[in-house]
Amino acid sequence: MNMTGGKKRAFKRGAGILCHISSLPGKYGIGSLGKEAYDFVDFLERSKIKYWQILPLVQTGYGDSPYQSVCCNSVNPYFIDLEQLCKQGLLDSDELKEAEMSGGRVDYGGLYERRYATLRLAYARFNINDRSFKKFVDSGLYDDYALFMSLKSVYGGTYRDWPRAYKFHEELALSEFKENAYKKQYCFWQFLQYQFLKQWKALKAYANNKGIEIIGDIPLYVADDSSDVWAHPEMFLVDEDLNPTEVAGVPPDYFSVTGQLWGNPLYDWDYAERDGYRWWTERIKRSCELYDIVRIDHFRGFDRYYAIPASATTAEIGSWRKGPGMKLFEAAANALGSVKIIAEDLGVIDDGVIALREATGFPGMKIMLFAFDGNENNEYLPKFITENTVTYTGTHDNDTVLGFILGMDDAQFIKFRKSLRAALKSEGVSYPIVSRQDAARALVKCALGTKSDMCIIPVQDILGLDNSARMNVPSTSSGNWQFRLENIPDRRIAAWLRYAVKSSGRE
């Protein structure tokens, strides 16, 4: 973990694409670690892209958000490549055919109904006495996860609905349950993590061998109904019946006039400090084993976090509390050494957040969609962007660039275009802007031309897609996380991108 105080540049100059695994094309209803993932890596290589950013790989729960998981260290069984299971002899061709789903947006309801049945067929043919698998299980890394999912399979609901001994994680009761559920449930959930990680290791090695690093995400918070809160309630602000006393969110902001009520339980940072931040250090360690670079979501919460009463229905009423600050990162650095981290320093940013980011040396984020409002002092304008930062056109929470521009009236577009042209000129870039589609492409060029060491472009913006391709709308509970590519971008797109990357000095 480079505690450089902002004096040392964290990354070599390069370009990246943001595309989650779920957004890859394929025959089975959601992107996977199969052929299309390897084809996407090949597209990145042809385009001279050095970084592939994805969203959290975790198993999603209610709402399908990768930022609300049943276990913060889990991986998503939906992403397992079924064709590789077939090659192992765990599925036959008829079962593979039966697992096919129509293309288009991800249908999470349909996946939930069908995919686990297919995975259980594969598990039924798997030898749980395999030496490699037994070593994986005996490591204990996924013990809490497998117990949690086994109990959920048997009793349903949330962990608060389970029999008291299980709800309160009583070791003797859990030991007996594990023994009884070992083959049918417990090892099934271990099998899913085992298969994913084996496939992921191969895909990551393929990307790394082509000079591409993978950027993954650590959400700051964990889901309320998760193995994390169930197995480690001492880490969270919950009452004696394990109900959160206060929950996470952000006050009214750019995205929502009533704020964002996330509902995640808050951490007991006093306990975490007394424990030497061991839980967090382990979480960062596990993430660094999955990814080459880790982006910490909602980094501002380590300086100060927003606490909302658990009974609240909006985020309008809450209070700011002091977070762990540098103490957490120093503990992690002492345990893990040098780690590549990006700080998502967006939202309500104040001097404390800026000071913390500068003290860690982590590069922060700059968003092009926020830049061109006519304010000459806007901090997101290219002229204010320095090397040790990561520039994005937008994130998974924003409009696509074209969607953003199409939403402007004529007067707004004229002002936007004037400001964008001035920024391009300052970068020495000449790009004609007549239509709104031209402006969207020009914004991508402008982002690549900034001084940021790293520039990440969502795949939707590479393809010039409108808001029908948007990934997530904050503070909405449906219709999100469903975007999928129809095909891997073709050679024509790769050629344009390769030229844009080269001309911006990011090759």
Image: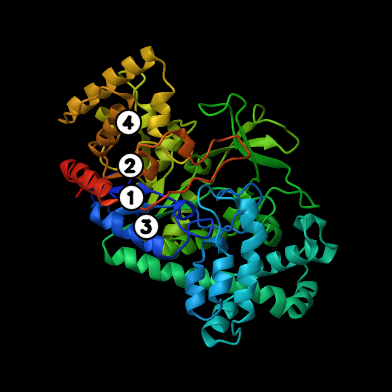
Q: Earlier in the sequence, mark 4 or mark 1?
A: 4
Q: Give the class, few, some or many, for how many residues have Cα within 10 Å of label 4's Cα (few <14, many ≥20).
A: many
Question: Dot 3: what SS?
Answer: strand
The residue to which callout 3 is attached is 214
Q: Residue at x 40, y 65 (%)?
A: 35
Mark 2 against mark 3, which lies toward the viewer? Answer: 2
Q: Nearer the viewer, residue 180 or 17?
A: 17
Q: Where is residue 194 drawn, in percent x and y?
A: 54, 73
Q: Residue furthest right?
A: 163
Q: Residues within 10 Å of mark 3 (few under 14, many from 20)?
A: some
* Residue that label 2 marks: 462
Instruction: Tell me if residue 299 comes above or below residue 379 in the rendering.
Output: below
Give how far apart the Cα atoms at labels 2 and 3 are: 18 Å
Q: Tag 3 or tag 1, which sits nearer the N-term?
A: 3
Residue 86: give x, y in percent of width and height. 51, 76
- First in sequence, mark 2 or 3: give its number: 3
**Colour scheme of the rendered structure:** rainbow
Q: Residue furthest top?
A: 411
| Disc 2 to disc 3: CB gap under 8 Å | no
- Where is residue 231, by image quadrant? bottom right
Q: Nearer the viewer, residue 115 or 147?
A: 115
| Mark found first going from the N terminus, 4 or 2 | 4
